[in-house]
Image (cartoon, rainbow, N blue to C red):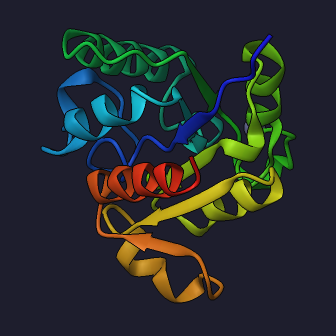
Amino acid sequence: MAKHPAVFIDRDGTLIDDVGYIKQSSEVSFYPFTFEALSVLQEHFLLFIITNQSGIGKGITTTEEVSEVNKFILKILKQQEIVIYDTFCCPHKTEDKCDCKKPKTYFIDKAQQLYNIDLSRSFIIGDHPSDVQCGLNARITPVYVLTGHGQMHRDELNNGVVICSNLLEASKHIILEITRHE
Ligand SMILES: [Mg+2]
Ligand SMILES: [Zn+2]
């Protein structure tokens, strides 16, 4: 069976505005370019969301609230005919030393097994150096975006990491990359 390339996408600061720990769907604000970016990407890749939601571990949000917010995001995306194959959420705070918080590769590995993903042709897009590191740890290609926390943490990146202004530019970059290698 043929393996599928995937794009793993961060949630806050990448797909939607990062406004802190989101408790309800009314706080969700999609970036204006998110739908176009995902429409382009899903023609070539299976799409996944991987999100660190330490607000749960800190007692600021609950698992139920975060899960409702994620469902809402998927519903809006579906209305735009965008299919997210799975959403993976780490509820832990850093001190918990869990196995699933990015930059750990737990959810990428899980997706690889569940959906037969070809990691050598896969990407991760995010606005935090931990997203980039997660991609490097999983041996997939990271693309850093300057929305959300991107601008603030830009100096922490190692040389050679691809930096795009936002998710749409990142998607264009990725499409260019794969057509160059076809
Ligand atoms: Mg983020
Ligand atoms: Zn975790």
Residue 28 seen in render: no
Q: Position of residue 152 (x, y in %)?
A: 40, 79
On the image, which quarter does residue 163 sit in? bottom left
On the image, which quarter does residue 42 sit in? top left
On the image, which quarter does residue 181 sit in? bottom right
Q: Position of residue 22 (x, y in %)?
A: 35, 36
Q: In the image, 118: left or right of 148?
A: right
Q: The N terminus lies in which quarter of the figure?
A: top right
Q: Nearer the viewer, residue 45 or 92?
A: 45
Q: Nearer the viewer, residue 82 or 99?
A: 82
Residue beneath the point at 56% across and 46% down: 182
- Compared to residue 50, the image places residue 33 above or below, namely below
Question: In this figure, what is the number of numbered marks?
Answer: 0
Given the current orientation, which residue lies at the most extreme front position?
182
Residue beneath the point at 27% across and 51% down: 168
Given the current orientation, which residue lies at the most extreme left position?
32
- Compared to residue 106, the image places residue 147 above or below, namely below
Q: Position of residue 175 (x, y in %)?
A: 41, 49
Q: Position of residue 52 (x, y in %)?
A: 59, 42
Q: In the image, 53: left or right of 172?
A: right
Residue beneath the point at 29% across and 11% down: 78
